[in-house]
Image: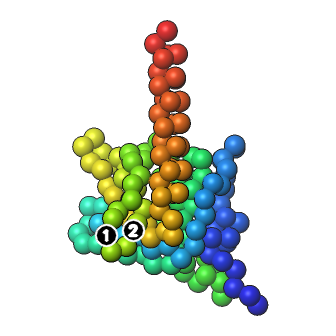
Amino acid sequence: MPEIDLAKRVIANLALYPREQILLVESNVNMVFRGGIRRYPRGPPEISTKLEGWTIKPNGALILTNRRIIFAAEGRKFLLLKVPEVLFEAPISMVYSASVAEGKVRELVISLETGIWRKDKFYFSVKDPDSWVRSINELISLNNKTKDSKEDTSEK
C-alpha cells in the first residue's frame, strides 16, 4: 500500500470554514519554537510558550488558508494508522508579522500576538520562505483593511 502524504491526510480531515480556501501546502516541514507541547488525556495538544527550552517538531505539514495557518505532525497510532495531529493553528488575525530568518538556513518566521505586550515566534523550514512571507503578509494586510473598514462603519 503506498504511503499517503501527511499534508494530503491533514487536508482530508480538515474542517474548512465557509469560503475558506487552501492557498499553500508543504510537507516535510520542521517547526521550532521556544516552549513546549502539553498533552492532555482528552482533547488536542496545546502549545505553551511559557515552558522553558526549545521544541523541534520534525516532518510536519504546513498549510496556509485565507483564514489561518496550520501545522500538523504525525500523531499517535489509532487502529494501526497514524492519525495527523494539529499542533499549531492560528487565525490570520493573530499573526503580527511574517518574515524570513537569515542564517545558515533560511526559515519562515511567524510572530503571533499572544498577549498585550507579548509576541511569540515560530520558525518553519519551508523550501521557499519568500513565497510564504509574501502570501501571509498579503493576508495580514487584507485582514487589517477589513478591520479598518468595520471600525469606520461602526463609528458612523
Task: Answer left or right for 102 relative to 13.
Answer: left
Mark 2 and mark 1 in contact (Cβ < 8 Å)?
A: yes
The correct choice, above or below, for 87 with respect to 153 in the image is below
Task: Answer left or right for 124 relative to 76.
Answer: left
Task: Answer left or right for 21 relative to 69.
Answer: right
Q: Residues within 10 Å of mark 1 (few under 14, many from 20)?
A: few
Q: Nearer the viewer, residue 79 or 154?
A: 154
Q: Nearer the viewer, residue 68 or 78?
A: 68
- Residue with the most extreme bottom position: 1
Residue 32: image location, x then y, percent: 37, 70
Per the image, the residue denoted by label 2 is 106
The correct choice, above or below, for 81 with respect to 22 in the image is below
Residue 69: image location, x then y, percent: 52, 55
Split into 4 quadrants, where in the image is the N terminus? bottom right
**Mark 1 secondary-structure assignment:** loop
Q: Quadrant of residue 61?
A: bottom right
Residue 6: image location, x then y, percent: 62, 75
Residue at x 33% of width, y 65% of height: 102
Residue 16: image location, x then y, percent: 66, 52
The correct choice, above or below, for 143 with respect to 97 in the image is above
Residue at x 49% of width, y 9% of height: 156
Per the image, the residue denoted by label 1 is 103
**Mark 2 secondary-structure assignment:** loop
Q: Nearer the viewer, residue 11 or 64?
A: 64
Q: CA distance from mark 1 to mark 2?
A: 6 Å
Q: Residues within 10 Å of mark 2 (few under 14, many from 20)?
A: some
Residue at x 27% of width, y 48% of height: 118
- Residue with the most extreme right position: 1
Q: Amino acid at mark 2?
A: Arg
Q: Amino acid at mark 1?
A: Gly
One can see residue 48 in this view: no
